[in-house]
């Protein structure tokens, strides 16, 4: 993943089931503006002592459909979010499961909290697996250079049917805000 800083007054982090507090950001100043486009990439990988491995990636875009409005000490934007993700979880004997998934949320909200924090929330958290829950909330702070990144845990897809099992292995990784020119 590229670490090119971008000039945006926002930041991102991810809240996942079983991954830290991840609560909403606390305002640090007046709400700033959200620059667009918003593009997030993430990657995670883990090798286990028994030889099991997990590799994951995602690439998301948030398209804002209206100008931001002030609400509850934050600037709130509405839009849509979508992209793609990949997960491969292999057992020591190289059996396992791998999949690519297109992702789309017809509604998404972005909240700029203070001058240096942002929360991105795709529509509802009504998912059926820890994997999909991992895309529910991104929230963090930006550094002085404009770079934003945070931790990401690629959780199991929680399936055990038709010969496919993905219920145990997680991968630790990170996400970053990237420029669309990259």
Image (cartoon, rainbow, N blue to C red):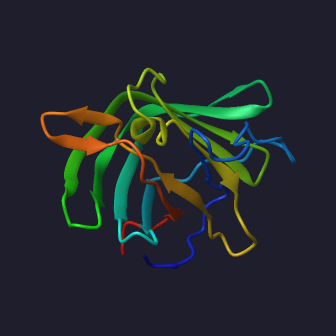
Lateral position of residue 141 relative to residue 175, left or right: right
Image height of 61 relative to 8, above or below: above
Lateral position of residue 97 relative to residue 171, left or right: left
Instruction: Count up the numbered dots.
Output: 0
Q: Residue furthest left?
A: 162
Query: Residue 35 or 136: which is nearer the viewer?
Result: 136
Could you tell me which quadrant the N terminus lies in?
bottom left
Q: Determine which quarter of the picture holds residue 146.
A: bottom right
| Residue 120 pos. (x, y %) | 56, 40
Image height of 126 relative to 14, above or below: above
| Residue 154 pos. (x, y %) | 45, 53
Query: Residue 105 or 54: which is nearer the viewer?
Result: 54
Residue 10, visible in the rendered structure: yes
At x 51%, y 35%, the residue is: 136
Lateral position of residue 131 relative to residue 92, left or right: right
Could you tell me which quadrant the C terminus lies in?
bottom left
At x 55%, y 53%, the residue is: 35
Image height of 69 relative to 25, above or below: above
Q: Determine which quarter of the picture holds residue 156.
A: top left
| Residue 42 pos. (x, y %) | 44, 61
| Residue 39 pos. (x, y %) | 43, 56
Residue 65, visible in the rendered structure: no
């Amino acid at each position: 993943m590229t670490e090119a800083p971008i000039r945006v007054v926002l930041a991102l982090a991810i809240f996942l089931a079983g991954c830290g507090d991840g609560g909403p950001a606390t305002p640090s100043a007046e709400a700033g503006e959200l620059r667009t486009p918003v593009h997030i990439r993430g990657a995670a990988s883990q090798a286990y002592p028994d030889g099991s491995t997990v590799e994951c990636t995602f690439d998301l875009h948030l398209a804002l459909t209206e100008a931001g409005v002030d609400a509850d000490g934050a600037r709130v934007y509405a839009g849509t979010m979508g992209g793609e993700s990949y997960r491969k979880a292999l057992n020591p004997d190289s059996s396992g499961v791998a999949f690519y998934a297109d992702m789309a949320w017809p509604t998404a909200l972005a909240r700029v909290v203070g001058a240096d924090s942002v929360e991105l929330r795709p529509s509802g958290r009504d998912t059926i697996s820890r994997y999909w829950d991992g895309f529910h909330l991104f929230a963090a702070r930006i550094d002085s250079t404009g770079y934003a990144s945070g931790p990401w845990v690629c959780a199991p897809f929680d399936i055990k049917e038709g010969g496919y099992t993905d219920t145990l292995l997680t991968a630790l990784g990170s996400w970053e805000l990237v420029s669309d020119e990259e």
